[in-house]
Image (cartoon, rainbow, N blue to C red):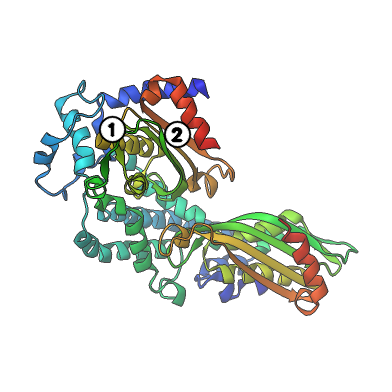
Amino acid sequence: MEYHHTSEMNGVVADYFSMCNESERNGLCREEKHSEDAADSNNLCHIEKAYSTILSELGEDVAREGLLRTPLRAAKAMQFLTKGYKETTQDILNDAIFDENHEEMVIVKDIDLFSLCEHHLVPFYGKAHIAYLPNKKVVGLSKLARIVEIYSRRLQVQERLTKQIASAISEALEPAGVAVVIEAAHMCMVMRGVQKMNASTVTSVMLGRFHDDPEVRKEFLALTMKK
Amino acid sequence: MEHSKQTQYSSNEKKDTGDGGSVLNGHFDGMVKRPAGGTARAAAAPQAPGAESGSHRAATSVMESWKEERTRSVEDNEMSLPSLAAAYTTILRGLGEDPQRQGLLKTPWRAATAMQFFTKGYQEKIIDVLNDAIFDEDHDEMVIVKDIDMFSMCEHHLVPIFGRVHIGYLPNKRVLGLSKLARIVEIYSRRLQVQERLTKQIAVAITEALQPTGVGVVIEATHMCMVMRGVQKMNSKTVTSTMLGVFREDPKTRDEFLTLIRS
């Protein structure tokens, strides 16, 4: 299965996925779902306890009204912010690839992106711009944004995130070229550490004709980087 | 805009007269680590506006609020670090990640230190920051410091809040070093906060320190808990304000302040 490279999973143990996807029988999948839900709530419990510890170690009063349910809320928030681990490109793309005799550039830009820095567990947010040159196959436009969601809702490093998005599109569509540019502000640099308010990090990955042909790359950059 | 201001004043009124605990993030009631010797200074502290009508306990808690806020020390930080790091390791495992992979090896420590930085307001006291920078000056026109970048943590979801604070005050023979206004913002914002409470704490601290004729504080912020999750509204902003003294009573003063911070 091309979509389950370990490198794509950010090192997550992919047992759950391989079990569910390799089994053809609905019965087995249903059982897996039950155990997945149980595992989920078990994990939620552990994360909640961990947040309780964090609050008290920071010197706060865990029993005050505003903080009473905070460990649970923070645990659920964290699970939401890392929900990308449970999603695969295959799930969202399977139906939305269409045969179309179109070979010109398709760009979806200004896709709002929110991720978590894996080094400090603090958000980074920004915009992603994606372009591809179809090779007889086009993809539903929202699917590009959904691919961004899958990979950004994880503990990430911006460089890897950009690459994963580009690789996923490349493998799914086999286009003549893919380009992904992400511009983001990292709260770990803004709120703490060096504390530079206006710094923004830009990473890009160019594959296929975007990599080989400077004119194509120039067209993409001109269309997306206009202020 | 006028309408919402009116309702805000009445709720401020209620908060001023009884619930001193709300100004303190609950610290006054709950904390074990507070250093001793706060009461002597509290006795010498000036009366805060609106506090005298509450109970004695509420009055002392409001008076003590700006004099004796520290609940954590640098040594506490060092001692808490291992358990904070262990908690973060549990969180990483609970999320399905592998804490042993290269990118995550030192993350629990980094995240713990980062979180301690984001709550460093608990380590700082207003009195340390302000003591030397109050000057006698015969100036009674409005002083405004605006566009102070502010970063806080939502106490409900432990996710960042960031925005800008605008502060204005009408001195009553005493002015404050300008950066001290920004430092007061830092002390109160680097905590687990609720935006309404943050705005109030800043205003009350300035009032207690300077006894000015009036203070106005406006905060506009973006809450990542609303942007990154939940209702997911990218462009939403929350605006809260606290107007004390002549800023509350005199609409012209208030208007002048609001116009100057918009320009």
For residue B41, side relative to residue A9 (left or right): left
Q: Is residue B254 above or below residue B195?
A: above
Residue drawn at x 40%, y 54% as measured from the top left: A44
Closer to us: B106 or A167:
B106
- The quadrant in which residue A21 appears is bottom right
x and y percentages locating residue B92 in the rendered image: 41, 64
x and y percentages locating residue A3 in the rendered image: 65, 71
x and y percentages locating residue A103 in the rendered image: 87, 67
Closer to us: B221 or A117:
B221
**Number of other residues with Cα within 10 Å of mark 2, as a class: few under 14, some 14 to 19, many 20 or more:** some
Q: Amino acid at mark 1?
A: Lys
Q: Quadrant of the C terminus of chain B?
A: top right
Q: Is residue A86 above or below residue B42?
A: below
- The quadrant in which residue B69 appears is top left
Circle 1 chain: B
Q: Amino acid at mark 2?
A: Thr
Residue drawn at x 16%, y 32% as measured from the top left: B60
On the same chain: label 2 and label 1?
yes
Give me the C-alpha separation between circle 2 and circle 1.
28 Å
**Number of other residues with Cα within 10 Å of mark 1, as a class: few under 14, some 14 to 19, many 20 or more:** some
For residue A170, side relative to residue B156 (left or right): right
Q: Is residue A196 above or below residue B214?
A: below
Residue drawn at x 64%, y 60% as measured from the top left: A148
Kindly state the secondary structure of the residue where label 1 is placed. Answer: loop
Closer to us: B121 or B225:
B121
- The label shown at residue B173 is 1
x and y percentages locating residue A84 in the rendered image: 56, 60
* Residue beneath disc 2: B240
Closer to us: B259 or A176:
B259
